[in-house]
Image (cartoon, rainbow, N blue to C red):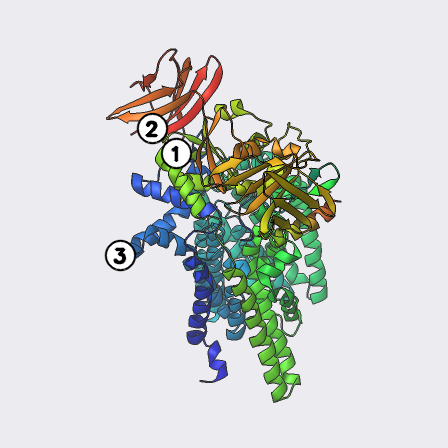
Amino acid sequence: MKLEDIFKPKVALPVLTAIALILRLIPLRHKYMLGYDPYFHLAYIEEALKAGEWFNFLTIAGGPWGAQVRNAHPLGLWMTPTYIYKILSVFGVSLYNAFRITPVIFGVLTVVFFYLALLKLYDEKKAFFASLFLAISFGHVFRSMANYYRGDNYMLFWYSVALLGVALAFSIRSKLRYKRFVFYLIPAFASGFASIFWAAYYPIFVFLLANAVFLGAGAFILDEREHLLDALALALSTLLGAFIANSLGGKFGYGMLGYNRWLGKKTAEKLMLEFGTIKDAYLLVHVKYLVPLSIAFIVLIFILGKFIKDKKVRAGVLVGLAVLGAFVLFYRFEALKDLSTGFGIFREAPIQETQPSSFNDLWKAFSISLFLIPLFFLRFDPNRVNISDFLVLGLIFPSLYMIKTWTRFLFIGSMAIALMAGVGIVELYEILKPHLNERKVSALGIGLLVLLPAVNAGFSIKETYSLRPYANEHWEDTLTWLRENSNQNDIVMAWWDYGHWVTYYARRSPVAQGRPYHGVALYYLDKFDKNWAMIFGVDYVIVSYYDFLKFGAIVETAKMHPKYNVTEKYGVIVLPLTSKIGALVFQRGDYRIIAKPGQRWDVIVNLKGQTISPKELYVEYQGKILRPNLSASKSNTYLYINLDYKYAIFMNEEAFNTTLARLFIRPEEPYELAYSDGGVVKILKLKHPNVKVERDGEKVILRFENATGTGLGIWGFLDNGTLVFKKWYNVKGKNEFELPEEVNGTVVRYAYAVGKKIVDRGIFRRG
Amino acid sequence: MPWARRSLIGGYSGGVEGEVVATMLINLRGYLMWEVKGLKLS
């Protein structure tokens, strides 16, 4: 076999598939899934399979109100792994494993379709290297790998399908003539289908329409008039795609800008749009403004092409039209400039995936390929440039913008980076090749085409291999205990990160999950008290070692509250035990704590050269918390030492007096320690007038513990979220209440009140 | 893992004894991130 044969599709495609597959399967070795989101998705799938239907109203999420899953994502997000499971179960694959490998299937398919598309748009070598860079891009791996399930993967998959459709229409121009336009149905259906897999599928429409516009621009500059028809067909295909998406939305649920979603309503209001046939704010803008504007542009350059023959003048005209188009859009929709930040809703939130990408992020995601992207523009030499180079600019420019905006978009942008790097590196090789002798050509080939991708792959393997799940035995044991020792209708307060685990492991409803909630943050900081918790029906509060690591995020989230002003200066340091010789030494960077146990403990805290002694010391060991006397106490600071897990938390008074620290170190009435693993995760029960829902055959009985309540509010809902029943009952002096037959609805919310004060709340599903 | 939907780890500065800047850290990487963020803010 000659070296060149490697690039033949029959060799290249299996090689690429194997590389993509191996890299994405690396995280499968972990017992737990990565991150938090996958746990919510799997919990809903399990509950839906148990119920035998894709029900909407989930009572084990969004406590105490419940969560309507149609308001989270379209159904395809959960149906896909379920059907994959149904197929693979024939071979004995469990739901857990089918769910864990679903992202790999779509990630690898994305690489395959991307390769097949580039094979038509470029050549074997360029297609191979661009796809290779995508296969080994950690930016792509991190959302298409085993054990981490997110929706972004589907959007890019459908885009790769759409791109293949466009490439097919391009490539068989000579054979089919105008019949080839039928291939533009592929991007139409791909963009339409993308809408039922992920709530934020919109970039596929932006990419395809931008592809059409750049294709038109390329056809104009290169004077390839037939490609103007391709541009027109592609723009129109996105129109059909938008109508398909709109129609599927009614059955599978709309995206995040749907008419029934808060963000959709807000966006429509900002952009002064009105929902009619089209029930999604983005699709409305796409159909009413973006497509007509793009078509007008294509038609205009078609006409101008008859009069302007000089290439330089043509380029000038394009720049002028681009400025004019941008002006028209931003003049009509001034609010568009805030679109990338969701109109500011996530801007201030301390969420890792919605931070702007730093250089460190870019390096981690793309490593060497990042520096190869300028090489792509070698293609724009007048002697080499072709129409495909213009087409792909529609993917490249929006991707570069997205990459810069949020770190989560490093994934979506990975395709454009891979394309630029892969095409660019081959281009450079081919430019230099004629100028070098045979030996130098070999060295160049090895350097550019072997070493660079190999080193890039090395970095990606290292990153992928170093991924660790956040979930562990502590969380699983704690939340499984809660599942087995609490009432089904109990509500749980935990930091939002862990909310999805509460849903999955405990099958109880958390107050916060999936997004930061300033109420919970203010509660942990003792700005909201137990009365606030009772209004939310909280029965259990979870506090953990990890909450102290995330203390900064808790404070920042509390500061997001529109009215509450957090002014305290909290100081918290978590330090690991680094030595036990002679004394206990805890150290982190410049911070060191030395503790000598004895009748009286000697504790010295060294903070960047300044030495102080804490006011109080708490030591947790073998499940007990002791408070030893201190030989000296010279400051208003507090120290908690955990000898079971070998760490210390050093706090100032403000931090020590927060509810979080109190519950973790010295819980008191009305909280009672219900479960502790000795220092990683603890569950506190909030003692309060409580409602326990029990079933006795057909009957539903609400039993009251600490039954001081006087009123019970009952709200009945249909599964689609429609309120169909609402009534307050007098329950003064009663210890139980049988749910009357007059109550309609399959999902029931209740509120237990003493006078007008709500003391418990919850939600349950009947039957 | 990077770029997940999770709270940011790596930083809060407050006052321990008024003048000593405190932070909470998960690991050295988190620490460096905080330092960089702190510098940018100032």
Q: Are marks 1 and 3 in contact (CB under 8 Å)?
A: no
Q: Are marks 2 and 3 in contact (CB under 8 Å)?
A: no
User: Is residue A265 among what the camera can see?
Assistant: no
Asked if residue A121 is positioned above or below residue A494 in the image, the reply reads: below
Q: Which residue is mark 1?
A: A57
Identify the residue at horizontal 68%, vertical 37% (top origin): A632
Residue topped by disc 2: A746
Q: Secondary structure at mark 1?
A: strand
Which quadrant of the figure contains the N terminus of chain A?
A: bottom left
Identify the amino acid type marked 3. Val
Of the residues under marks 2 and 3, which one precedes in the sequence?
A: 3
Q: Secondary structure at mark 2?
A: loop
Along the line of sight, the residue nearer the viewer: A389 or A529: A529
- Chain at tag 1: A
Residue A90: which disc? 3
Mark 3 surroundings within 10 Å by alpha-carbon count, few (fewer than 14), some (14 through 19), many (20 or more): few
